[in-house]
């Protein structure tokens, strides 16, 4: 690791991970891979210290992130100068690229400075001979950080006009971004179908367009897409409604050998809808008491475990602990597991114990692509459920970001039950993990809060949801 980085005290293991992630991103760009470059470093506890409180002169060399804080406090030009000088001391383009993304993420996600983040990503790129990648990097960074502005459209149009390869790399991520924040529409579908026809490497984009056509219930467009590219029929394991379509319209001869798998997937689709309806009815039944238990450490020492366990239903999120040391404060009971779609054995283990498992992904049935792990869970008896299509849109509009699992479930419960008493919500603080003296985000482990949520706004919405 360069002496400069050592002097600035980036933890060597985290810096090595960021460099590894940058190499993976450089080899095969995507918004997800780009997020891995800066996520670990920017999720360190220090990133959540209040802006501009890095400390005295004695602490100036503790962290590049703290140095950037102080430079931003002095003005954007000071920040640009700091980063420019820092990049000039690094040994190779991979190191420079990693530091650019880490500091740009700090500038945007902590300080809210989008223009500065764009500038930091571009610094030195022309001399590095990286101009052809610059537009792609800017767009994928903005997409992964959930930026909504007209600059995104301009960057994508530039990619389409200047290079089919880079446009193909960005198209799926950008379609999903637009789907998320504009909502699904025929206009969006037709726009990206036109782009797919321009691009030579567009199989992934066509798959995404097929899924969007199913989301819009555009049966005629679905049939046209499958007629244009019969090979799309083989994507039944990626586009779940396609398995149902093939079952109902006849499995083509060339797929007879996988007909049983198509049926398994189509049955998974049916059961997700069935369990989602059952969960909705159960949550709407106000005769059943409901405790919603987040993972914040704010309940430690309050001895509320027995009260939590006294509810008919207890919802918990992602990874949580039922260990004895936390039972007094957080209880052990849970009947509803609200989680992300990650294929993770520990998540699956918890899901197997729940009455219902909610996969809290926007338009889950339409946007998820790896269904085989969920087929296995379903056939083990796990009741997989999802929010109604389009449910996330209202929250995303208020937050200008992705809602956390906790806030989304609280909003859904309030919608169904009519009231969500604050006394039935535990382990929610939203902002005690950020600021000058951050605590851990989880009661059972040291963890930083997710970068892409807007915790102060979430607190405001949560307060309204739980007020009488």
Image: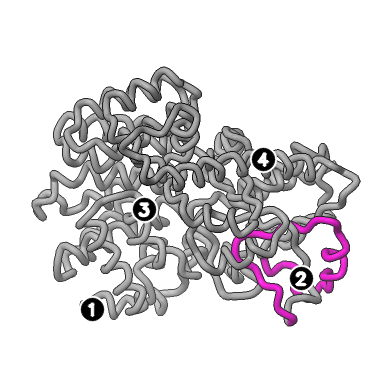
Q: Is residue 87 above or below residue 5?
A: above
- Left or right of residue 222: residue 413: right
Q: Which residue is mark 3?
A: 32
Q: Which residue is mark 1?
A: 1
The location of residue 436, given as percent across then percent down, is 57, 67
Determine the CA span between mark 1 and mark 2.
45 Å
- Residue 255 in which image quadrant: top left
The magenta segment is 296-324
The residue depicted at 44 percent of the width and 35 percent of the height is 242
Q: Quadrant of the C terminus?
A: top right
Determine the CA span between mark 4 and mark 1.
54 Å
The residue depicted at 31 percent of the width and 67 percent of the height is 18
- Residue 327 in which image quadrant: bottom right
Label 3: how many Cα within 10 Å (few below 14, some 14–19, many 20+): some
- Left or right of residue 287: residue 379: left
Does residue 82 appear in this view?
no
**Disc 1 or 3, which lies upstream in sequence?**
1
Determine the CA span between mark 2 and mark 4.
28 Å
Most foreground residue, 209 or 152: 209
Q: Which residue is mark 2?
A: 332
Determine the CA span between mark 1 and mark 3.
25 Å
The residue depicted at 46 percent of the width and 31 percent of the height is 245
Judge depth for marks 4 and 3 and give the one in front.
4
Tell me if residue 320 is in the magenta stretch: yes
The location of residue 379, given as percent across then percent down, is 58, 55
Label 4: how many Cα within 10 Å (few below 14, some 14–19, many 20+): some
Callout 2–callout 4 Cβ contact below 8 Å: no
The location of residue 124, given as percent across then percent down, is 16, 54
Q: Is residue 348 above or below residue 146?
A: below
Q: Quadrant of the N terminus?
A: bottom left
Determine the CA span between mark 4 and mark 3.
31 Å
Q: Which residue is mark 4?
A: 274
């Amino acid at each position: 690791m360069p002496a400069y980085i050592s002097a600035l005290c980036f933890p060597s293991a985290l810096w090595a991970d960021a460099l590894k992630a940058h190499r993976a991103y450089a080899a095969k760009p995507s918004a997800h891979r780009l997020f891995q470059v800066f996520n670990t470093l920017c999720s360190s506890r220090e990133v959540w210290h209040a802006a501009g409180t890095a400390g005295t002169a004695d602490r100036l060399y503790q962290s590049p992130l703290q140095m950037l804080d102080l430079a931003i406090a002095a003005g954007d030009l000071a920040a640009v100068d700091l980063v420019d000088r820092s990049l000039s001391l690094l040994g190779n383009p991979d190191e420079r690229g990693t530091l650019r993304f880490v500091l740009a993420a700090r500038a945007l996600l902590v300080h809210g400075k989008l223009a500065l983040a764009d500038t930091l990503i571009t610094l030195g790129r022309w001399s590095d001979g990286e101009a052809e990648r610059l537009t792609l990097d800017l767009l994928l960074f903005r997409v992964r950080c959930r930026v909504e502005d007209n600059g995104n459209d301009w960057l994508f149009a530039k990619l389409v006009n200047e290079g089919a390869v880079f446009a193909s790399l960005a198209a799926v991520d950008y379609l999903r971004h637009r789907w998320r924040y504009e909502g699904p529409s025929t206009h969006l579908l037709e726009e990206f179908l036109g782009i797919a026809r321009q691009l030579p490497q567009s199989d992934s984009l066509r798959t995404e367009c097929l899924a969007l056509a199913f989301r819009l219930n555009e049966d005629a467009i679905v049939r046209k897409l499958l007629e244009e590219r019969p090979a799309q029929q083989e994507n039944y394991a990626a586009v779940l409604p396609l398995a149902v379509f093939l079952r109902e319209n006849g499995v083509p001869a060339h797929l007879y050998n996988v007909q049983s798998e198509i049926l398994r997937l189509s049955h998974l689709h049916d059961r997700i809808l069935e369990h989602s309806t059952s969960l909705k009815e159960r949550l709407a039944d106000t005769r059943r008491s409901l405790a919603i238990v987040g993972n914040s450490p704010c309940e430690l020492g309050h001895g509320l475990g027995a009260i939590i366990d006294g509810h008919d239903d207890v919802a918990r999120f992602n990874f949580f602990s039922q260990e004895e040391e936390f039972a007094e404060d957080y209880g052990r009971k849970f009947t509803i597991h609200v989680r992300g779609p990650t294929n993770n054995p520990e998540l699956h283990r918890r899901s197997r114990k729940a009455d219902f498992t909610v996969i809290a992904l926007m338009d889950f049935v339409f946007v998820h692509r790896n269904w085989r792990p969920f087929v296995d869970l379903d056939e083990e008896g796990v009741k997989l459920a999802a929010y109604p299509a389009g449910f996330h849109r209202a929250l995303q509009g208020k937050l200008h970001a992705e809602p956390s699992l906790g806030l989304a479930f609280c909003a859904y419960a309030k919608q169904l039950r009519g009231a969500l008493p604050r006394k039935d919500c535990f382990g929610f603080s939203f902002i005690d993990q950020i600021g000058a003296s951050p605590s851990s985000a989880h009661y059972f482990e040291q963890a930083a809060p997710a970068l892409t949520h807007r915790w102060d706004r979430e607190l405001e919405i949560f307060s309204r949801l739980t007020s009488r």
